[in-house]
């Protein structure tokens, strides 16, 4: 079985610059990377503390402009060292809302989403 760990928590934001400023100045996270999604619509920013092997915060702008007042956690992600193996395994379990395919980001990271039992979004992510 592929090695796994909690990789990141995705938070939808309305203003990426304001959110990066907040998470770096108030929380003390460091901006580790910022990019446009391969779909050309969504912007992503990854923040963390000083470790390479850590759980990160992913800020997501452009996914949904109708956020509730309290904000919205979009998903949590589990890191894996074999995304293809995990995709095949999850597909075999017939979980709801499984993505049609594995998505590759411009930085080479790969992921897919599916739905948990309470409708929560879960992502498997390989760097």
Image (spheres, rainbow, N blue to C red):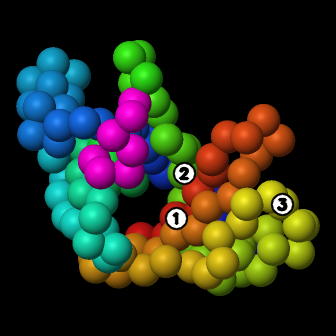
Q: Quadrant of the C terminus?
A: bottom left
Q: CA distance from mark 2 to mark 1?
A: 6 Å
Residue 125 is labelled as: 1
Instruction: Answer whether residue 2 is visible to the viewer in this image.
Output: no
Is the stretch drawn in magenta largely helix, strand or loop?
loop
**Residue 21, image x and y in percent?**
9, 31
For disc 1, the neighbor class at 10 Å (few under 14, some 14 to 19, many from 20) is: many
Instruction: Say which label, 2 or 1, has the lower sequence index.
Output: 2
Residue at numbered disc 3: 95
- Name the residue located 26 percent from the left edge and 72 percent from the top edge: 40
Instruction: Answer whether residue 87 is visible to the viewer in this image.
Output: yes
**Residue 123, image x and y in percent?**
59, 57
For disc 3, the neighbor class at 10 Å (few under 14, some 14 to 19, many from 20) is: few
Please tell me which residue lies in front, 72 or 46: 72
Which residue appears farthest toward the front when viewing the image? 66
Q: Quadrant of the N terminus?
A: bottom right
Instruction: Say which label, 3 or 2, has the lower sequence index.
Output: 2
Contact, mark 3 vs mark 2 (Cβ under 8 Å): no
**Residue 108, image x and y in percent?**
35, 80
Report if residue 71 lies within the magenta region: no
Q: CA distance from mark 3 to mark 1?
A: 17 Å
**Residue 109, image x and y in percent?**
40, 74
- Residue 72 vertical placement versus 37 (above, below): above
- Name the residue located 84 percent from the left edge and 60 percent from the top edge: 95
Residue at numbered disc 2: 77
Which is more foreground, mark 3 or mark 2? Answer: 3
Contact, mark 2 vs mark 1 (Cβ under 8 Å): yes
Where are the magenta residues, as a range? 61-67
Q: Secondary structure at mark 3?
A: loop
Q: Secondary structure at mark 2?
A: strand
């Amino acid at each position: 079985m592929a090695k796994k760990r909690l990789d990141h928590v995705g938070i939808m934001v309305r203003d990426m610059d304001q959110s990066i400023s907040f998470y770096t100045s108030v929380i003390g996270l460091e901006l580790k990377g910022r990019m446009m999604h391969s779909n050309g619509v969504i912007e992503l920013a990854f923040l963390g503390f000083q470790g390479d092997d850590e759980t990160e915060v992913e800020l997501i702008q452009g996914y949904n402009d109708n956020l509730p007042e309290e904000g919205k956690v979009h998903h949590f992600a589990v890191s894996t060292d074999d995304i293809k193996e995990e995709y095949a395994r999850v597909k075999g379990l017939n979980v709801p809302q499984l993505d049609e395919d594995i998505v590759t980001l411009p930085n080479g990271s790969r992921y897919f989403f599916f739905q948990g039992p309470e409708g929560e979004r879960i992502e498997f992510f390989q760097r």
